[in-house]
Image (cartoon, rainbow, N blue to C red):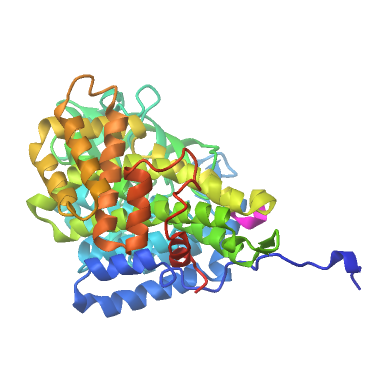
Amino acid sequence: MAASTHTVTNQAPPLVGYDVFAADRALTEAVERHLEPSLLETARAELSELGRTAGSAQAQEWGVQANENPPVLHTHDRYGNRIDEVDFHPAWHRLMGRAVSAGLTAAWVRPGGHVRRAAGFLVWTQAEGGHGCPISMTHAAVPALRADPAVAAEWEPRLTSTVYDEGLRPAAQKAGAIFGMGMTEKQGGSDVRANTTRARGLAEDGTYELTGHKWFCSAPMSDGFLVLAQAEAGLTCFLVPRVLADGTRNVFAIQRLKDKLGNKSNASSEVEFDGTWARRVGDEGRGVRTIIEMVAATRLDCVIGSAALMRQAVAQAVHHATYREAFGGKLIDKPLMRNVLADLALESEAATTLALRLAAAYDTGGEREQAFLRLAVPAAKYWVTKRCTPLAGEALECLGGNGYVEESGMPRLLRESPLNSIWEGSGNVQALDVLRALQREPQALNAFLEEVGSARGADHRLDGAIKDLLTELADLEGIEARARRLVERMALVLQGSLLVRYAPAEVADAFCASRLGGDWGAAFGTLPHTLDLASVVERAAPNR
């Protein structure tokens, strides 16, 4: 019998056994807003099924297992033969299988596919973030492959399949395929034009032999990879299959797996190409233009992934405060804690609303939406991913010492939080990309201003922020040195415009007062006390 001093009281129960999708009002409303009515019933059913799985004890255990048992590289077999295989815990494969079966790589071939897929990615990533990397790259490879109709005809059905078929075999023998990517090199990083990997043409048209290295090659267990290499006419995009059609292994020497801050479940590697067979995708010398659509899609996934992590962090913080008592009452009823939770909830809802708006632009298509995405994606990628880490840290603090302990799951969220800000171009790369679009593509700025301007007149603080933004855009003096400030303002104005149009009044009011009106401190929990903070927190609660 336990001693009486060991009786456990005043501990929040685990947040488990709930529908991650249905409990997220900002997300469910965004899906209803952006999907055609004829698709809603089916989409809601699919997303709730995925949400219940994501919120289950089983899926949460998969996430723990996949991170506590990270991938292991085996470069050689017992006889000394080079095999370059990466072993994953079974939990990783279960996570991957559920993601693929949920259509998270099939957006391009389903009606309303990008909104449905973005919502699903946001829901399922809350179970575990690391496996989202190969899921994202498989999804994003499709538009790049379409630069070559013959390549797309062969590979697209495999990438958009809802069957996860693990193991290294010729892709033609598999029911589905997963893709990775290798762009950066030691000497260049994001400056991919500095790449030194060479491509030598072979006798068969469109085929090459690659020699060189990749400093970051994501998901090395994949069936195929899009890589950049220098051909005779310049930097070119290539498809590198992991296993050749005759069943032999392509030359794909994995030197090591990266020991990362977080993202432990996912394998990131360094690889060497030495006579590696590759197939050209797009024209020689146009590698960046060919692969840029893949980059744009993965950048949007950085936004969605960060929104997912924020949502899970906020859900955990609000859940804990709902049950935990201190100083004579529930934490959630304490004015100061309510201010913190409301501030975190605003950041999370703004990220979710923006992410789904961008996904909807992919579904709508057309010149106007494409122009809008050209500016909105890098601006959102810059800002939303940067807000993720301070939010995760503050949410962890809401749990006190309990949040600092691994069993809470909060440390894993915190370690994962910087990833999306770095992946696919860190902050400066995004800011410079926005400047490039402003200088070269005036239609992109027109589409962006049309989008934010659709809410003008609804809130004086938003109107003032738009006016200030126009002043910033009109002054090109020292534009590069102040690019971060400009892009931050663009992202906030866009989020404010969306919330004013679509969110409840108390959410829009609090966002505009703090983020646009300047009535805000340097830390979370500094919202004006006169706002309806209780309603903001209640809206964010996962345990309804």
Asked whether 285 or 202 is in front, the reply is 285
**Residue span colored magenta:** 405-409
User: How many numbered dots are placed on residues in this image?
Assistant: 0
Horizontal relation, residue 353 to residue 437: left or right: right
Q: Magenta region's main secondary structure?
A: helix
* Location of residue 82 with respect to 308 vertically, above or below: above
Residue 110's image quarter?
bottom left
Identify the residue at image location x=45%, y=63%. 540
Horizontal arrangement in the rendering, residue 258 relative to residue 239 (left or right): right
Residue 293 visible in this rendered orientation of the protein: no
Residue at image x 66%, y 65%?
Answer: 12
Residue at 20% across, 69% down:
111
**407 in the magenta segment:** yes
Percent position of residue 487, x then y: 28, 36
Magenta span includes 185 = no
Going by the image, does 61 lie left or right of 493? right
Q: Residue 112 occupies which quadrant of the picture?
A: bottom left
Q: Quadrant for the N terminus, please.
A: bottom right
Quarter occupied by residue 419: top left
Estimate the x, y position of residue 486 in percent, counting from the top left: 26, 33
Percent coordinates x, y for residue 139 in the rendering: 30, 55
In percent of width and height, residue 238 lies at 24, 39
Q: Nearer the viewer, residue 351 or 287?
A: 351
Residue 126 visible within the image: yes
The answer to which of 444 and 515 lies nearer the viewer is: 515
**Which of 342/121 is in front?**
342
Direction top: furthest residue: 478
